[in-house]
Image: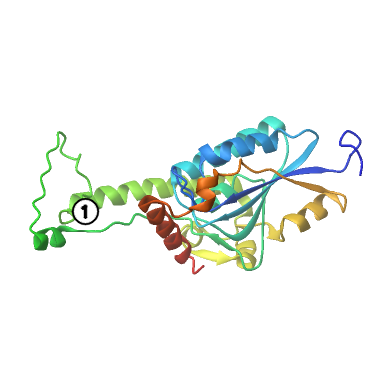
């Protein structure tokens, strides 16, 4: 084995971005700027770097965290002047696709799920349950719109209209980002691509949402030859307690259910 100083094989940093995108990653992990930012910094900091590969496997999540992680990827790519390739595994959907678009090119498996370029808000209404239980809701606010989308009272038309405007604004940001990154490679009109629909990898290539079919190892060989070296770059191992007791808290269980629901929307 050659000493590292004499090893001149193309070096490719390989980062896995896996799980739901959330500002508070739970026991099962997830993607956020806090967790992924340091890993990306290390990946782009490798010496004699030929490229950075991102293996993405995410059903989506927080729009803000998606935007922050994508912005970090672009800043580092421009500073280090290295190409970034997104390699989609099971899914790069919604926020996962937002992050994938930070790459210069996107490759996917024929069975990968890509797209879901939309924004969703979900909640519950408990007003009838409160009445049956004999619980009185006491709420005081300063500001006419401070109590917004309160689950303990019937939905108000003005709240629904406000939420719809908010979702449309976020959707516009998402669509503008995809358009700016994919540009002329998109081969379908916005009213087909930006509806929240998702597609398997082969169809995503036809639509211009991905560039070709493949995986990380195959893409490394295609671009850099048989001697290309994929260097895994990961974060620190989670604490022992987290590894032994992944479902320790009620919050962890709720987060796990939310992530399960996100994957279920993709049929996975």
Q: Residues within 10 Å of mark 1 (few under 14, many from 20)?
A: few
Q: Out of 32 and 244, give the one closest to the viewer.
A: 244
- Above or below for 109 versus 6: below
Q: Secondary structure at mark 1?
A: loop
User: As drawn, which residue projects farthest toward the top?
Assistant: 79
> Which quadrant would residue 71 be assigned to in this image?
top right
User: Does residue 118 appear left or right of residue 131 in this picture?
Assistant: right
- Is residue 144 visible in the rendered image? The answer is yes
Task: Identify residue for label 1.
Answer: 151
Residue located at (42% from left, 50% from top): 171
Considering depth in this image, is 131 or 61 the residue closer to the camera? 131
Q: Is residue 119 visible?
A: no
Q: Where does the image place residue 151, in percent across and percent down from the top left?
A: 21, 53
Q: Is residue 213 left or right of residue 197?
A: right
52 or 212: nearer the viewer = 52
Image position, residue 156 (x, y; %): 17, 53
Q: Who's the residue at 8% across and 51% down the image? A: 136
Q: Is residue 267 above or below residue 64?
A: below
> Which residue appears at 89% of the width and 39% of the height?
7
Q: Position of residue 68 (x, y in %)?
A: 51, 38
Residue 7 left/right relative to 220: right
Q: How many marks?
A: 1
């Amino acid at each position: 084995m050659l000493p590292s100083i004499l090893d001149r094989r193309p070096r490719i940093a390989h980062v896995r971005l896996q799980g739901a995108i959330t500002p508070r990653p739970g026991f099962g992990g997830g993607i956020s700027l806090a967790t992924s930012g340091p890993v990306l910094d290390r990946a782009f900091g490798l010496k004699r770097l030929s490229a950075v590969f991102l293996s993405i496997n995410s059903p989506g999540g927080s729009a803000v965290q998606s935007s922050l992680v994508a912005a970090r990827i672009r800043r580092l790519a421009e500073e280090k002047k290295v190409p970034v390739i997104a390699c989609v595994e099971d899914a790069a959907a919604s926020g996962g696709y937002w992050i994938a678009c930070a790459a210069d090119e996107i490759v996917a498996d024929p069975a990968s799920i890509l797209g879901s370029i939309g924004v969703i808000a979900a909640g519950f209404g408990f007003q009838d349950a409160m009445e049956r239980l004999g619980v009185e809701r006491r709420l005081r606010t300063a500001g006419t719109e401070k109590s917004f989308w309160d689950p303990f009272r019937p939905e108000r038309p003005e709240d629904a209209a406000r939420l719809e405007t908010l979702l449309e604004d976020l959707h516009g940001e998402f669509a503008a980002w995809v358009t700016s990154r994919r540009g002329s490679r998109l081969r379908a009109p916005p009213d087909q691509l930006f509806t929240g629909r998702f597609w398997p990898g082969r169809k995503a290539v036809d639509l211009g949402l991905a560039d070709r079919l493949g995986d990380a190892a195959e893409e490394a060989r295609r671009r850099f030859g048989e001697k290309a070296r994929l260097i895994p770059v990961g974060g620190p191992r989670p604490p022992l307690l987290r590894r032994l007791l992944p479902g320790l808290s009620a919050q962890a269980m709720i987060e796990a259910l939310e992530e399960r629901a996100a994957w279920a929307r993709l049929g996975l």
